[in-house]
Amino acid sequence: MLALGCAGAVGGLGVAAPRAQRPALVIEAFTSARAYAVGTDAVTLVGTVRNVGDGLHPADAATGRVLPLAGLDFLEGDTLPRIPALGPGEAATFRWKLQPTSDSAPLIASFTVSQPGGRPLVRLTAVPHFPAPPERDPPVVSPAPSARAGDDRGTVENSRIRARVQVTPADVPVLLLSCRTPAGWRTAGASVPLVEVHSAEGGQRPWWETLKVREIQAAAARDYATLSLAGEVGLRWRCRVELVAQSASSALDCRLSLAAARQVRLMGLRFLPFLAGEGGPGPRPAQQSPPSSAPGLAAARWGDMTVGVLRPGEPPIPGWSVAALPGVPGADYLFLAAEARAAEPGTPVAAGAAISWRSRLVALSPSASVEDAGRLARTPPTPH
């Protein structure tokens, strides 16, 4: 008689016992419901917790905590929300209202989720803060591509699309995209932060840092105009972003150039997340591009205006992956963004090494379908 003595055998047949299903919580989003704050107007923060495991997360087994860390006082919302029961893939979204303590202070808050037997989950958010609202779109139309720059702002445009960049007192650039419609210029969305880099030195744990702008330059030729933003991402990266408007085009070509100031380990990169509908039509478009649309394209249509963002099929570094970031439930915009990631333990980058990536913002009117953005996305970028 043969005896089976396999560890974990079930019924003597050598079949491993099934693994217990377990929940796994992540903070999927924690950010402002608007692209930026103005003066001492109240700020709404939204946070989403999702169960990415394969088991049920029981009600009240985890607790959230929101803390204003700089420039904010609490106004409304539960600062210690209990996380409800969440099945696999389910999420819960929370909202809080906070008051800036001055008209230009940095605004920073944290969201922590504590759960028994596990490490706390922590997310920070810094809200771009202007003392006064950004300038409105001027009604004039430039027949040829043009660009102009000042100390803390710049504009690049043609007869169809306009990008205005305004820098906060903390040197954070905010891009405001507008589309010329039959009724005049209309806000299409915003982008902030323009660049985020996830990196570290030596044995450090990597963390995300954002672009701070030090210089804005403008240049124009017969068929195109360029707005250039130069600055740093933390202490480890020199950065330049170029925004190029071609003649009679509804696309804005965007180029990122990074140079390592020292030897680092690079983990991730985000470039030009697009907050579609921010400051204009809002978060609920009439139509969104399906996953089968042009590769790398995310677009949405409100009425007769279609806006979107196109990212190249190739990642910034060979072997990296590029994936769409989750949306932001409860925000006043539709979040269209992607992240390029390295496999663990990251990509070593020597001091002085350069990295580049491209993106394209699209805003066109009149438009009857998001497929219009797909056709525009397939046109080659400017070679300039």
Image (cartoon, rainbow, N blue to C red):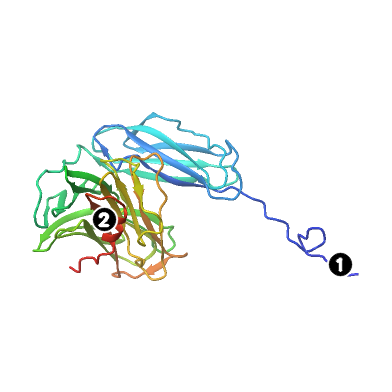
Residue for badge 1: 3
Quadrant in which residue 135 is drawn: top left
Between residues 5 and 205, which one lies in front from this camera angle? 5
Secondary structure at numbered mark 2: strand
Q: How much space separates mark 2 and mark 1, taking CA atoms?
A: 67 Å
Q: Position of residue 378 (x, y in %)?
A: 28, 64
Q: Position of residue 192 (x, y in %)?
A: 29, 49
Can residue 234 be seen here? no
Q: Residue shown at 41%/37% (left/top)?
A: 67
Is 333 placed left or right of 341 in the picture?
Answer: left
Amino acid under disc 2: Leu
Residue furthest right as drawn: 1
In this rendering, which labeled residue sits more in front, label 2 or label 1? 2
Label 2 vs 1, first from the N-terminus: 1
Residue 361 disc label: 2
Neighbours of disc 1 within 10 Å: few (<14), some (14-19), many (20+): few
Residue 85 in the figure: left or right of residue 45: right
Q: Name the residue nearer the viewer: 145 or 168.
A: 145
Residues marked 2 and 1 touching at CB (< 8 Å) = no
Q: Secondary structure at mark 1?
A: loop
- Residue 221 position, x and y percent, is 9, 63
Query: Where does residue 107 sit, x and y in percent of width and height?
Result: 31, 40
Which image quadrant: the N terminus? bottom right
Residue pictured at 31% horizontal, 32% vertical: 42
Going by the image, does 30 lie left or right of 272?
right
- Marking on residue 202: none
Q: Amino acid at mark 1?
A: Ala
Q: How many marks?
A: 2
